[in-house]
Image: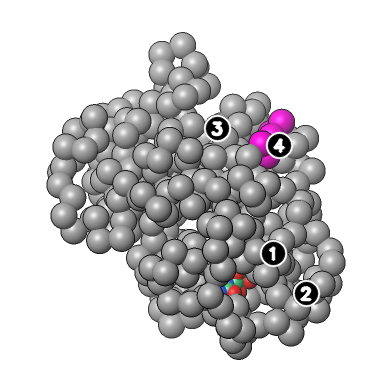
Amino acid sequence: MDRGSKPAVLVTGGAGYIGAHTAKALHEQGYLPVVYDNLSSGFRQAVRWGPLVQGDIRDAAALGEAMAAHKVQAVIHFAGLIEVGRSTVKPDLFWEVNVAGTTSLLQVMREHKVERLVFSSSAAVYGQGARSAQQSIAEDAEKAPSSPYGDTKLAAEWMIAAQCRAYGLAAVALRYFNAAGADPSGLIGEAHDPETHLIPLAIAAALGEGKPLTVFGQDFQTPDGTCLRDYIHVSDLARAHVAALGIELRAGAFEAVNVGTGEGRSVMQVVDAVAKAAGCQVPHSVGARRAGDPPSLVADPSLARDLLGWTPRHSSLQEIVADALRWETRPAYGKGVRASSGRGSSPFTSSAD
Ligand code: UFG
C-alpha cells in the first residue's frame, strides 16, 4: 500500500473496543482510520483518530459513499455481533449481521476496487472438538465452533477466502483469543452493555460496583478446574491489525492467523491477579458451567510471529489487569455515560450523520 499520503483505512466497527484501539494504532503508524459504525454498541467518544461515518454494515450505498469520499485503500472489518450467549437465542440475527453484512462489504469493496482486507475473526471458530485442554491451537486445528457466533465467524472466513480466490482480493483473518486491558492513555477502553467478560466483571466485583463474580464451573479437566483462556492485551491486538495490513500478500491470498500469547490463564488466576492489583478480595462463588464455554482456548502464536512479525509486548496478566483497572476506575465512556454524551468530544466531525 502507498504510505506516502496517509492512506485511508475504513475501520468498520471502529467505535467499539478493539476497533477503537486499532484506529489509534493506525493513526500512530501514519494511516488515516475512517471509522464506519452504526453506534449500536460503539461509542462516539471512542472515535478520536479520524472521521466517523455513521452507518450500518448492511447498508451497501452508505458503505460505498464512505469508500469513495475518503479514497479508502483498505478495510479492517470489525463490525458485527459478539455476544456468544445471545447468538444461541438469535442465530438468524447473527447470520444476517456477521455473514450477510460481510457479503455486503465485500461486494462494495469489489465495486470500489479496494483489494485489501483484515477481518476480525475469533478463537471461537475452534471450539473444543477432540482437542485436549493441554493442547495449544494452531490455525489448521479442527474447527468445531460451540456457538452460532463461532459458526458465523467461520462462515465469514470461508466466504472471504472464496472471494479472494475468485476476485483477487487479499485478506488476513485474525483469530483473536481473549482481548483484555485498555490503552494506558485512559482515553479508550472496554465498555460493553451488558458486560459479560471476566476481567471487567471481576474488577467491578472487587470495587464493590457489581455483583459478586460467579466462576462458571470448577470441574473442567484443567489444572485448577476452571477454564483456561489466552488473554491478549488489546493494544497488542491492535498492533497485529496494522502488521496484517503491512505484509506483502499476492492478489487472491487468504491467511488466517491466531492472535494470542500462547499462555493459558485460568479463571482463578485472573481472580487472583485482580485481587492483587486492586488490593482487595474479589467476592466470588463457584457456579455452574456456562453453555458453550470450551474448557481451554490457548493459541499457538507461531504464525503471527513468522508471517506478521508480531509478538505481544504488553500481555502479561499483571499489565493487562493494571490497565483494565485504571480504565474501570475512571472510564471515559460507558457505564451510563453514553446516555448523557453528546457530539463534540471527538476532534473530528461526522461526515454522514
Ligand atoms: N467467566 C466466569 N465468570 C464470568 C464471566 C466469565 O467464570 O462472569 C469465565 C468464562 O467461563 C471463561 C472465562 O471466564 O472461562 C473468560 O470468559 P469471557 O466471557 O471473558 O470470554 P470468552 O472466553 O467467553 O470469550 C471471548 C470473546 C469471544 C471469543 C473468545 C475467544 O468474548 O468472542 O474470547 O477466546 F471467541
Distance between the Cα atoms at labels 1 and 4?
Answer: 23 Å
For residue 292, side relative to residue 64 (left or right): right
Alpha carbons under labels 1 and 3: distance apart:
30 Å
- Secondary structure beneath dot 1 equals helix
Asked whether 73 or 346 is in front, the reply is: 346
Q: Nearer the viewer, mark 4 or mark 3?
A: 4
Q: Is 73 located above or below residue 12 in the figure?
A: above
Q: Earlier in the sequence, mark 1 or mark 4?
A: 1
| Residue 269, label in figure | 1
Q: CA distance from mark 1 to mark 2?
A: 9 Å
| Mark 3 residue crowding within 10 angstroms, few (<14) / some (14–19) / many (20+) | many
Which residue is under mark 2? Answer: 224
Is residue 98 visible in the rendered image? The answer is yes
Are discs 1 and 2 less than 8 Å apart at CB?
yes
- Residue at 69% of width from left, 64% of height from top? 269
Which residue is depicted at the point 26% across and 45% down? 44
Residue in the picture at 55% in, 69% down: 282
Disc 3 secondary structure class: helix
Which of the two marks, 3 or 2, is nearer to us in this view? 2
Distance of label 3 from label 2 (alpha carbons)? 36 Å
Residue 100 position (above or below residue 172): below
